[in-house]
C-alpha cells in the first residue's frame, strides 16, 4: 500500500479555539480535496485553498464530493463537517467534535435531567433575551408567551422598516421555493445560524439533542442556542435581503449576508461563552487536560492516581521508584489516550 505524506497532525493545544475561527463555509457542486494543511475546493471556475484550522464548520450541499484525506484533515483540525440539503436548509449529519473532554456533556446531561435545574437554565436563556427584566418567577408557559410576543413585535418592526409585506411565518421544509420571498430568506438565514450553533455545540463536546427549551429532537439544543440570536441577526437580515432580492437569488444572497454578519459579530465566541455560562462551567480551558481518561467512582465521581493494570510493573513493589514516577505521571487520571504505533 502506498505511503501518504503530508502535514503532521497538530496537537490540540496548537489549534485555534472555536471562538477564534471564522464561522462557516457552504459548498455545493464541487470537489473538496486536501493539500498540506488546507482543503482545496475545485469546480469549473478553478481551485481555491481554505486553511482547515481556521474553519468552524464546513457545510456540504448537493453535488459536493469530499475525499477521505480532506475529511481526515478537517477532523484533525477540529472543524465540524455538516452535510446539508439544497441552500443549506436541511440537516443530514455532522462530523466529530473538537474537544476530547466530556466535561460539558456531563454537566449538560445533569442539568437537563433535573426539572429544577432545567427550568433554571431555560430561564437564563430567556433572561438573555429580556435584559433588565426579572424572569426568575415566571413559568415556562409565561416565558413562551413573552417570547412569542417579542418575536411577533420584531417581525412587525422589520416589515415596517423594510417595506416587506408580512403575513406570518409560513414555509414547507420540503419545498424551499413554495414560500414567499421573505419566508425563503428567513429559512435560509435560520439554516445558516443552526449550522453555526450546531458546529459550536459539537466542537465543545455538548449534545445537540439535549435541549432545555426545545425537546424531543436530535437538534433541540441547537434550536435553543440559535434562538438567542435570531432577533438580533437572522430576522433583520432576512427582511433586508428580501427587500432587494428576487426569489431565485434570495437564498444565496441571504447566506452571504448571514456569513458576513456572523463573522463581523464574532458569534462563535459569543455562542461558546454563552454555552459555558448556561452550563455553569467555570473551568479554565487552558488548565483542563482533554486527553485524560478517568475511572468513574460512585462516591467521588472519578478516581485520581489510578493506574491501569497494563501500566503497572510486572512485579508489584519490586521497583518502588519506577512505580512512584509512573503514579506521578498519571496523577491527573488513569492514563492518556495514545495512538497505536504500527
Image: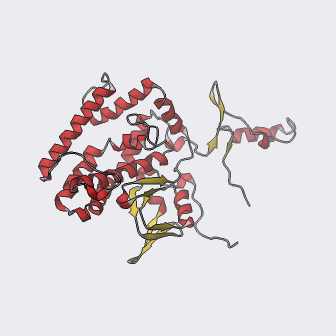
Q: What percent of the width, then of the height, locates residue 268?
A: 38, 49
Taking the spot 42% from the left edge, 64% from the top edge, the residue there is 62
The mark tally for this picture is: 0
Q: Is residue 234 visible?
A: yes
Q: What percent of the width, then of the height, locates residue 154?
A: 20, 42
Which is more toward the observer, 307 or 238? 238
Q: What percent of the width, then of the height, locates residue 319?
A: 85, 39
Taking the spot 21% from the left edge, 35% from the top edge, the residue there is 149
Quarter of the image that includes the N terminus:
bottom right
Q: How is the image coloured?
A: secondary structure
Taking the spot 75% from the left edge, 41% from the top edge, the residue there is 326
Task: Classify residue 242 as left or right of residue 315.
Answer: left
Task: Classify residue 158 as left or right of residue 303.
Answer: left
Task: Classify residue 40 as left or right of residue 307.
Answer: left
Q: What percent of the width, then of the height, locates residue 53?
A: 48, 59
Q: Is residue 265 visible?
A: no
Which is more toward the observer, 8 or 4? 4
Quarter of the image that includes the C terminus:
bottom right
Q: Is residue 41 above or below residue 158?
A: below
Taking the spot 24% from the left edge, 46% from the top edge, the residue there is 169
In this view, the residue farthest toward the top is 137
Task: Classify residue 146 as left or right of residue 88.
Answer: left
Which is more toward the observer, 198 or 183? 183
Occupied quadrant, residue 69: bottom right
Amino acid at each position: 500500500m502506498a505511503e501518504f505524506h503530508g502535514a503532521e497532525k497538530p496537537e490540540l493545544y496548537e489549534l485555534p479555539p472555536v471562538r477564534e475561527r471564522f464561522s462557516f463555509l457552504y459548498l455545493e457542486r464541487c470537489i473538496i480535496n486536501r493539500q498540506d494543511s488546507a482543503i482545496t475546493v475545485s469546480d469549473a471556475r478553478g481551485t481555491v485553498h481554505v486553511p482547515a484550522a481556521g474553519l468552524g464548520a464546513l457545510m456540504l450541499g448537493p453535488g459536493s464530493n469530499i475525499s477521505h484525506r480532506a475529511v481526515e484533515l478537517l477532523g484533525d483540525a477540529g472543524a465540524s463537517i455538516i452535510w446539508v440539503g439544497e441552500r443549506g436548509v436541511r440537516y443530514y449529519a455532522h462530523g466529530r467534535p473538537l474537544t476530547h473532554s466530556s466535561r460539558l456533556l456531563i454537566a449538560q446531561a445533569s442539568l437537563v435531567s433535573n426539572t429544577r435545574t432545567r427550568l433554571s437554565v431555560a430561564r437564563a436563556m430567556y433572561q438573555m433575551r429580556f435584559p433588565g427584566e426579572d424572569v426568575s418567577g415566571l413559568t415556562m408557559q409565561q416565558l413562551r408567551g413573552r417570547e412569542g410576543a417579542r418575536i411577533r413585535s420584531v417581525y412587525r418592526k422589520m416589515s415596517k422598516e423594510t417595506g416587506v409585506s408580512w403575513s406570518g411565518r409560513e414555509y414547507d421544509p420540503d419545498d424551499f421555493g413554495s414560500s414567499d420571498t421573505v419566508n425563503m430568506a428567513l429559512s435560509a438565514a435560520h439554516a445558516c445560524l443552526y449550522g453555526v450553533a450546531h458546529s459550536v455545540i459539537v466542537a465543545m463536546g455538548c449534545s445537540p439533542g439535549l435541549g432545555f427549551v426545545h425537546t424531543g429532537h436530535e437538534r433541540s439544543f441547537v434550536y435553543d442556542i440559535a434562538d438567542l440570536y435570531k432577533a438580533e441577526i437572522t430576522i433583520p437580515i432576512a427582511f433586508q435581503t428580501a427587500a432587494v432580492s428576487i426569489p431565485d437569488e434570495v437564498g444565496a444572497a441571504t447566506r452571504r449576508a448571514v456569513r458576513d454578519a456572523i463573522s463581523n459579530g464574532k458569534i462563535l465566541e459569543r455562542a461558546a461563552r454563552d454555552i459555558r455560562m448556561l452550563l455553569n462551567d467555570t473551568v479554565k480551558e487552558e488548565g483542563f487536560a482533554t486527553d485524560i481518561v478517568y475511572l468513574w467512582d460512585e462516591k467521588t465521581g472519578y478516581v485520581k492516581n489510578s493506574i491501569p493494570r497494563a501500566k503497572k510493573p510486572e512485579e508489584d513493589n519490586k521497583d518502588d521508584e519506577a512505580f512512584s514516577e509512573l503514579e506521578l505521571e498519571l496523577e491527573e487520571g488513569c492514563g492518556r489516550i495514545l495512538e497505536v504505533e504500527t
